[in-house]
Image: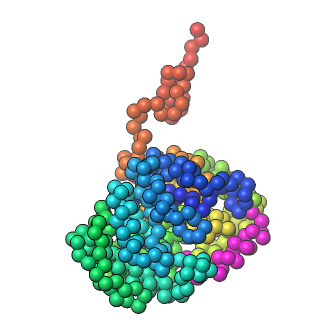
Amino acid sequence: MKILWFIPTHGDSRYLGTTKGARAATFDYFKQVAIAADSLGYEGVLLPTGRSCEDSWVLASSLIDCTRQLKFLVALRPGLMQPSQTARMTATLDRISGGRLLVNLVTGGDPEELHGDGLFLSHEDRYDLSTEFLTIWRELLAKSHDGESCDFDGKHLQVKAGKLLYPPLQRPYPPLFFGGSSQAAHELAAAQLDTYLTWGEAPAEVAKKVADIRQRAEKYNRTLSFGIRLHVIVRETEEEAWRAAGELISHLDEGTVAAAQKKFASMDSVGQRRMAELHGGKFNPKNPRDGLEIAPNLWAGVGLVRGGAGTALVGSPEQVAARIKEYADIGLEYFILSGYPHLEEAHRFAELVFPLLPVELQKSLPGRTLTGPFGEIVANSYVPGEKAQVQASAS
């Protein structure tokens, strides 16, 4: 089990859909989140992509020196980037980070945004382009270890005697991640990707996706790992967690939700459509669970105004850990999580849920062995345990 966190390069807040409680998306803040994730023992961080975000490659490069073990999951964008140049970027970032690069293929799902970036291909053609892009990208990086060149002549892309002089540290190339819910996406994942990511649907639906991709991968004699992208709202009690979920959307109004849903409906992403179908744009401000708890402890409220991953695990530490184990039993290995605000919730999740996760994961986490002050020293000389039991005698 590998737990990753999220760098909110499109902004962060205590409340969704309002400027109230918002905080500036600055480099100093991104560094705080990255250092927290690194020191707490998260496997890595996802850096989002799109015109609403800071560039993931530039930011990942800038965060190398302030972290030690943290891996960076950054985006490949077929049609916006050439495979040969992206392969060089991949090799460079992997080398200078000491092998801490993960790459995430993003085909795009918002035609308006893609048009603004100069890409006018249909959904189907974007997947054809992505297939060609990955074929070149993978071959360039794999052959760079032996100094060999690459030729490719496709419908969208052509390369003659392409070559990388500096290979990546990871062989044959950094791990490839990808998420998509269409049939074309599943086929591409089965044929070329290393890890398939799903957004947070109910376990039964996730199981169907995993089974479908595994079956498709058998045709190519390939096996994949699987992961999920979720938000988390965990508190010491279930009641507190659901109260926090309600507070997160407490400043939403029907107009804001309707505007967001109209925008999402214009996208050609099958995954985005599935997220929207979980809630239908309806919510009850007086009861955040009403119509939005789509499975035990799985809440669709985030997707009322946020594109992409729109569900959260909500509950006590024991409940959230149980739901994670339920997904793990389906075959999921990677859990890419986030919470609002991201700095505080990175600490909260680690403190409350990490101790309940598999022993193998706990062994890899820092701070589990007490080698110095752990918590606030009591009465100037006592190191606290789980429950402070210091008996002071009157003098």
Percent of width and height locating residue 138: 33, 75
Residue found 58% across the figure and 8% down from its top? 395
Residue found 60% across the figure and 73% down from its top? 275
For residue 88, above or below residue 234: below
Residue found 55% across the figure and 63% down from its top? 54
Comparing 44 with 118, the one in front is 118
Res. 83 in view: yes
Comparing 120 with 336, the one in front is 120
For residue 65, above or below residue 335: above
Residue situated furthest left in the rendering: 146
Figure disc tally: 0
Residue situated furthest top in the rendering: 395
Task: Give the residues in magenta.
Answer: 252-271
Magenta region, main secondary structure: helix
Question: Hey, which quadrant is residue 158 in on the image?
Answer: bottom left
State yes or no: residue 255 in magenta. Answer: yes
State yes or no: residue 153 in magenta. Answer: no
Percent of width and height locating residue 125: 48, 88
Residue found 40% across the figure and 80% down from its top? 133
